[in-house]
Amino acid sequence: MTEVTISTLPAAPLWAFEIWRNPDAVATRFAAAMGFALPKMGTSGGSDALRLIRYEPTVWLLEGDASALPSILDTDGALTAIGGGITRVLLSGTGWRRLLMEGGVFDAESPAFAVGCSASTIIDHVNIRLHVQSEESCLAYVPLSYTQGILHFWQEAAKALD
Amino acid sequence: MTGPSRPNTDQDSSFIFDGMRYPARKGDTLAAALLANGIGLVGRSFKYHRPRGIMTAGVEEPNALVTVGEGGRTEPNTRATDVFVYDGLVARSQNRWPNLSLDFGAIFGLAGPVFSAGFYYKTFFGSAKRWMFYEHFIRKAAGLGNAPRDADPDRFSQRAAFCDVLVVGAGPAGIEAALEASEAGKRVILVEQDEIIGASLIRDPQEQDSAWVSESADRIRAAGGRILTRTTASGYWEHDLVTLTQRLAEPGQIPANGVAQRLWHVRAGQVILATGSSERPMAFPHNDRPGVMLSQAVRTYVRRFGVCPGQRVVIATNNDDAYLTAHALREAGAQIVAILDARPAPAGQANGFTTFNNAHPLSTKGSRHCLKSVSGLVDGVSKSWDADLLAVSGGFTPVVHLHCQAGGSLEWNDAAQAFVPAQSRQNVKTIGGAATPAAIFTSAPVVPAKKSFVDFQNDVTLADVDLAWAEGYRSVEHLKRYTTLGMATDQGKTSNMGALARLAEKQGVAIPEAGLTTFRPPYTPVTMGLFAGAAAKDAGAHKRRLALYDVHAAKKPIWQPLGYWFRPRAYPMTGENLAEAAMREARSVRTAVGMTDVSTLAKFEVSGPDAVTLLETVCATSVGKLAIGRGRYTFMLREDGFVFDDGTVWRIDENRYLLTSSTGGADRMATHLSYVRNYLHPELSVSVVNVQEHHAGIAIAGPRAKSVLAKLIGEEPPRHMSTVATKIADVAVLILAASYSGERAFEIYVDARNATPVWGACETAVVAEGGCLYGLEAMEFLRIEKGHLVVGAEIDGRMTPHDLALDKMLNKAGGFIGSAGLTRPALSEAGRRQLVGLEAVEGSIPEGSMLVTADGKSPEGHVSASAFRILEGGSIALGQLADGFLRHGEELIATSPTRGQRARVRVVAPHFYDSAGERYRD
Amino acid sequence: MMLINCPHCGPRAQSEFIYERTVDSVPPAGVSNDKAMQTLFTRGNPRGVDEEIWRHTFGCRAWMVVTRHRVTNGISHVRAVGPEALP
Amino acid sequence: MNRYSAFGLLRGALNGQKHWQPAWRDPEPKAHYDIIIIGGGGHGLATAYYLAKVHGLRNIAVLEKGWIGGGNTGRNTTIVRSNYRLKPLHDLFEFGLKLWHNLSDELNYNVMFSPRGAMFLGHSDADMVKLAERGDAMRCDGIDADLMTRDEVAKLEPLLDMSRNARFPIEGGLIQRRGGTARHDAVAWGYARGADSFGVDIIQKCEVNGFIRDGDAVVGVETTRGRIGAGRVGICVAGHSGHVAGLAGLKLPIESQTLQAMVTEGVKPMINSVIMSQSLHCYISQSDKGGIVFGGDPDNWPSYAQRGHPMVMEGAIAQGLALVPALSRLRMVRTWSGVTDMSFDGSPIIGETPVRNLYLNGGWCYGGFKATPASGWTYAHTLATGSPHALNAPFSLERFMTGATIDETGTGPMPNSR
């Protein structure tokens, strides 16, 4: 029996952190100010207080306290609040990888999709962003309006994962 | 057909066929169990309703089709050779009336000489209605089983998988390939359509035995490989994507965990096809009688299922393989009456069998249920033998379907008289019997063409092939389509080579020059529910739920779909219908105040020093002079110059703008903005973020909206087309003073997760001012009366800014998308449809009706939206009318023949309410 | 279903992408209105290789130019387009 | 030419059906024809037939690179209807529908045209208004259309899911009772046999790979079977329009895409009409052999591959099963794909090209089969007289540059979103 638990997490502050020019300079300022590098495509960086997850070439999903960032961006980018439109859904248990293969097209079972990795994909016709927290948990960022539909889909699929 | 040929002792389940209960043994296919119970007649053919039995032991079976299961799990046209018996299985024969033994449809067989290939094309002339009369009976006679009438109670799953190596077919070659790859550290999937792997080793024991099979399976799994049985690789698509169909329950069986089947989308690094070959029948008159079986199938029934399908057996062959069948039958106690070997000389296989060389079967005799005798030609002399089973082997056809679906080519193997896989542009290779079929001997036996079946299920005979040739249907595709050859549920697995040989013979060319039809997915038929997957329940379209769904649901509104969204259409009070509720709500907005949920509007935050440049590229209006805290109406053109969306643009900070546009066009606008920003103008310093779902939106409108707002925010509300960031119920909100209704109005935007308390505060304040909630229906009344446009109604993708009277707002500086398209001459010619208002002179104006000058005239326009004057009453509408701007005052008819409604209307300006816009001013 | 090698995400299933238009359908900046309309309303549409504009809509949302053979579906090249980005 | 009749078949029953002659000849190409039609699909063959029948021309060839009827004619879902919204489309398709109703007799070849009704379902009040608008437009232009109540829909198609809580509940429908289906292959074969009987040369396995030019005019074609001279040349190659026009140096407002269709195993009658939907993108009918024929939207990217994307098919089936849940346990037995010629306003192009003596018939998108008789008839007129008939005059190639597009859905010049 493959196990996975599906739970909705409370709201968190989420931002789109976008760089429109001088990316190297911003990256340098960022690393100096924050103590870690801007994460590469498909990965995340930071801590629970402030995590940046890279899903797009010029945009990072930022979760946590963003107050330090406008000055880092200066006039090379912008920060935009987006958290209202996103539900955080935690998939925990050893079965999360297999669950993500249901109705999916992305290789969540790949060993290369390791802790700290991120991917944006389509599952059951809905654009979902994934972040591997540990071998036993994966966080999914789901569009608010589709949350009900996806939760239902996952709950049904979880009944027959084997 | 003889009776049961194996002991009853190990029979552990039972099944029902045509109402009778029979015992079965674990591991039996339905075909094996039927044979074991002495049942020879299983089905009726498609066209002539000829009695048919079991011909094969695999998925290529053309004859033994039955309906399995009950209620919503009923699966018609199930091959008895491809369903494993479970306790309680219910099967019914099909395409017969009143029953299998006595089928009145067999009359079609008697009239066979008339029902030749292409028969339908040559008769039933007269009117289309007359054809429909005949067609009614033809349709009733056609078809095979009956579809279930009930909904499917089970679920179907779709799952993705990725692997380095996908091996299709778990015979000895496939198992070995999978073992090797998995132990080399590769991610491996091995699929087998049978219930067990290595089944051919039971039929034909080799050095590798069942112990080797199970040990290999263990090693594959231990190395991380996945073995999927009851799984068929049914489609090979682009870039090595293979679809697998896995049965988690047998046809008609209740699945253990609710899922009947799973569709796998496997992306493979490499695909290895070890799909083997299928045996060919031979063409001779009455070769379709129950009791005529393929040789390897006979051997499978004997060795794997312990069923001996006959006691007195004639074998007809053109190769060595059939001698293995003779041995298997002899071991099982059957008598080999004769072996008819097409080859001219003894093949060294005789082993005491009565073998005739240069011998061919010529015909069979028997009853509906069984075979009684076989006649043949030996060195040109006819002979006859009493027999209850004729096992035939006409050679072997490699299963090349997947290779061909992958875009691979074939080459001709002359010894085997078969096509084998050659090159492929995908990463696929074929191994085992599918790559190297056994050699056969072919001659051109002279047999009568009539009743010599090549396509058993569709009743296509050599005579039909000959007729198609004579009538000019000479390409293999014409032949197929004219005769229906290879188009039955077996897709020609047993028939194509026989027909192709005949076609080549007619053309006087070698078989490879005659051509070959295309192999298309699926390899074997796939349950529709499986393709739909979980999406079957919602058509693949999740309902999109408002952030404030719970708040609305508690009020039990009438919901209205809008794309995938569902929004309240009206909030009826007890006893009110939709129209009454909507009119009450609209009146409340006109006379007091109302509030509504506008969350679904498309919204984009555009920031950065180049925000204006981007916005003035996308919007056809000017944006640059907008002061901070101000907003204005805007619209957007396609590149061809037609209006495709509209909305508002707000400057909320020095370098930050909010752009709104229509709900229905939200995805299109998101793509358009992204295209302009990233593809056309990557150099811009600008960020475009889709915040459609981030903000919930609440609109408050009406003469008392301002005082409601003042109470809510404790300060002077922004004036019309101004914006302010403030708080309501201690939650940060952005207020845009914009009006869709024609009244003084405000849109309040709030982080969707914090929307409920804001809504609550607003509702309290609105109700306190004597207002109420309003839904989409009232909103529609309000905007029509005001003359505001809607994307999908007035903005229908065919109207220019001028047609919509928006041209005065066009950005004089140009440079916006669509400015080039606008210059095309037809966009400013006379006769264009233009936006007008319509007021009823008599009757009520039907929405969607046509505008004509008199009954019987062709339409000159149509009604895009209709409503009633909210306070005064009277039917009004917006419409599009040819040269409408010049026709104010003219009377027309708005007619709806499909609804039997019409109204006399007067053309007026498209503003029925406060055309001066005075109600916006404080 | 093709496998498209996204310049930012690596090989991904076609279902994550949306085709938008061909490179040859985009009017170059600054051309005459006539030329712009001619470009917009005609495409080479070759029975062979063409340059197509795709977007990884349900992935990284980036735009790219895919050089693809329309008969074999062989993709010979994928080029990223858009603002300058970090690796 | 043998005349086809029940009597002929009975006679054949006695002689083993041995008296039938080839339905068309297999001639060698001549050096010159008055008119050459490139493309032996339904449209090209119909054009040849009407050139001979209506315009009395005889020196005509149809050049087919493969076998006749082997392209989209044999790869569609066989639906015939004229239920459009815009007037030029009404005029063209309704003219065709009238020809369909007498086509079997006209050709002495049973094309099995079965006007069992083409029904669009509506799933909301808004859908029903849109359907009424379409129906009203049709009725005002003299075309049959009837709105149906829920009960009438349920009576016609008892297996539709009529429950109120369905994802796309059925509120009613719009039916064109004179629409229906036909046997696609028979249309090509019937026109071929008819054209052949007038002396038209139907030349198969003859691919055009170049145009012979004399100044600004086309005077013939280069083919795999040699040079053939021509007075006028008509392109009629559907999805390959871009390729063939390219041989003459033309770029068209056409993009080729794959359109998939599929059929299930045969079952006894269960679907009575042609079911389509205002909000969903699938269409369902049942063939005379009992198979449920299924179609959906095109794979909306360019392709000449004649093979589709499985997930596009899966999407269409999910929608179909939402409408008719009883289809769930039927099995899909065969899929196929055509190469559709998606035009930039969704309407066809029938008329002159900028090259003298070269004409174009294409851009049929996913709606070409139903137009076969009208397309052939109007194209024959255009080729015979050198200028378009009133029916096809609005469908000129130049309309895209002038802006007089005929855009039924208002989608604009993006074939991928049509």
Image (cartoon, rainbow, N blue to C red):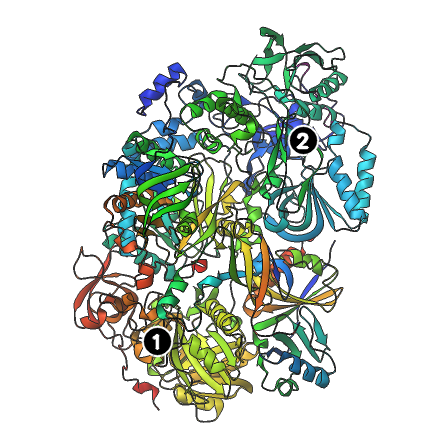
Q: Which residue is mark 2?
A: B14
Label 1: state its secondary structure. Answer: helix
Q: Is residue B582 above or below residue D116?
A: below
Numbered disc 2: secondary structure: strand
In the displayed structure, would residue B4 be above or below residue B605? above
Disc 2 with disc 1 on a shared chain: yes
Q: Going by the image, does B530 lie left or right of A38? A: left
What residue span does the magenta drawing correspond to?
Answer: B304-314
Q: Residue B73's mark? A: none
The amino acid sitting under disc 2 is Ser
Quadrant position of residue B716: bottom left
**Residue A58 seen anywhere in this rendered image of the structure:** yes
Q: Which residue is mark 1?
A: B586
Q: Position of residue B49 (x, y in %)?
A: 48, 24
Which residue is rendered at x = 72% and y = 23% of the image? B302
Gap in Å between the C-alphas at discs 2 and 1? 68 Å
Determine which quarter of the picture holds residue D38. top left
Quadrant containing the C terminus of chain C in the rendered view: bottom right
Query: Residue type at mark 1?
Result: Ala
Q: Earlier in the sequence, mark 2 or mark 1?
A: 2
